[in-house]
Amino acid sequence: MASPRPLRHTRAMQWTDARARQLLRSLFDTAVKAADPRAVLANHLPPKPEGSCIVVGTGKSAALMAAALEDAWPDVNLTGTVVTRYGHATPTKHIEVIEAAHPVPDANSEKGARRLLERVRNLKPDDLVLALISGGGSALCALPAPGLTLQDKQDINRALLASGANITEMNCVRKHLSAFKGGRLAAAAAPAQIVTLAISDVPGDDPAVIASGPTVPDPTTFADAREILARYGIHPAPHIASHLERAEQETPKPGSLPNSEFRLIATPMMSLFRAAEAARRSGVTPVILGDALEGEASQAGILMAGIAKSVRTHNHPAKPPALLLSGGETTVTIGRGSAGRGGRNTEFLLGLAIALAELPGVYAIAGDTDGIDGTEDAAGAIITPDTLVRARDAGLNPRAMLSGHDSYTLFDRIGDLVRTGPTLTNVNDVRAILVT
């Protein structure tokens, strides 16, 4: 008996609205699962220590990473503390979990950073510190440098978040206002060996940028931090400006932390590869455009619309059905007085929808893999060819809402938000555009 022929994917037969939505959501979930520490952490552990094993950590995945470590090393006497975002705690047997605020730090962020530094002091050379680091860790552990206050750090953090600065720029400034970041945790742990297991949420997977690099040398300087603030028109209070002139308080520089080893256990590109494999199994040609795309979110939507139109019109860079995948972290520059609700992923999608102008056969999903787009309760949203029509039928003005940074409200009103709840991992944003 002859083998049945493979089912041909035709635009008319295969790509209903429901099927496109289902595929996009499943691909997003696949990307998130690829970064689950319960699946990947055990493969990256160092040899078990002869001395004590102290666990410290910060980030949205820190508690789940700690639980995964306890499962992987049930015969090791693990003690320590990790700091995670409110609502991201996971039960642990031995490792203390502190919850703190994100993206603007709070008193628990300061408490958590102090507690982690206490955990690593007075150790011996045969002791091992395991540092569990993931996205969000910079805000979650915020110990002000001498002479500064938590309020100082909160004020600068809010200004940076609204400025359009990218994550590398923001974390450069944060490191130079901190007694914890920029390698200072590793310096405090010496002479013990410190091994960092990290889930990357930053473009380029730079260890010095992930959670502001508390366990790795810092190549940036006070001068860099001053230049970034000036570039975005942020004028710090006089005592903060004075602190940023004190070169003698610089962070540990490359070559100064021989006791520190860094291991990536999950990255944005790993998740994009996994989503691409799943798309290929569904008969869709994946094109990975990069894992480090940055820039203004709405402008990135316009750019991606142009690529989607090229696929639809010219079969380039792939013939439909095709999937355009990208990762990274865009930004949203918020003007004074803006009262809209939204995150960078919903803003990207609304910009994309407007630029596509109801082009048939194009669908998209974009979301933050931690399950929270900015400060809202959704990971992101989905758009379809009739997104703008449905928005206008609901009495909404898409262009005005994009200008007012109110994309969350638009997608909420038309029922297209993607709500996952906290995923307890974070490899930044995943964007997938399906062209049928």
Image (cartoon, rainbow, N blue to C red):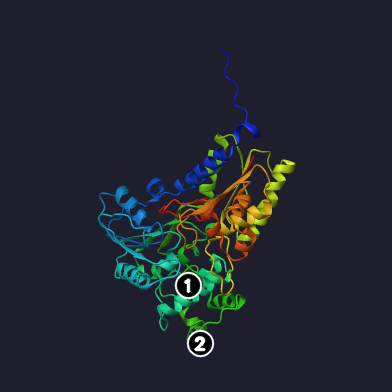
What is the count of numbered marks? 2
- The span from disc 2 to disc 1 (Cα, nearest Å) is 18 Å
Write down the quadrant of residue 146 in the picture: bottom left
Q: Is residue 203 left or right of residue 39?
A: right
Asked whether, in this view, residue 434 is left or right of residue 265, the answer is right
Residue position marked by numbered label 1 in the rendering: 175
Three-letter amino acid code of the residue under disc 1: Lys
- As helix, strand or loop, the secondary structure at mark 2 comes to helix
Q: Tag on residue 304?
A: none
Q: Which residue is more in the foreground, 6 or 401? A: 401
In contact (CB < 8 Å): disc 2 and disc 1: no
**Of discs 2 and 1, which sits in the foreground?**
2
Identify which residue is drawn at 56% across, 70% down.
Answer: 338
| Earlier residue among tags 2 and 1 | 1
- Name the element at disc 1: helix
How far across and down, in percent of the image, does residue 206 sit? 52, 60
* Residue where numbered disc 2 is placed: 238
Q: Is residue 205 left or right of residue 389?
A: left
Image quadrant assignment for residue 5 = top right
Q: Report the residue that reaches farthest toward the right.
A: 314
Along the line of sight, which residue is nearer the eye, 253 or 328? 328
Where does residue 87 sit, x and y in percent of width and height? 36, 59
Looking at the picture, how far across and down is residue 181, in whole percent? 44, 70
**Label 2 neighbour load within 10 Å: few <14, some 14-19, many 20+:** few
User: Residue at the spot x=59%, y=72% of the render?
Assistant: 335
Q: Is residue 397 visible?
A: yes
Please state, as top left, top right, bottom left or bottom right, where the C terminus lies in the image: top right
- Relative to 67, residue 9 above or below: above
Residue 227 drawn at (x, y percent): 59, 77
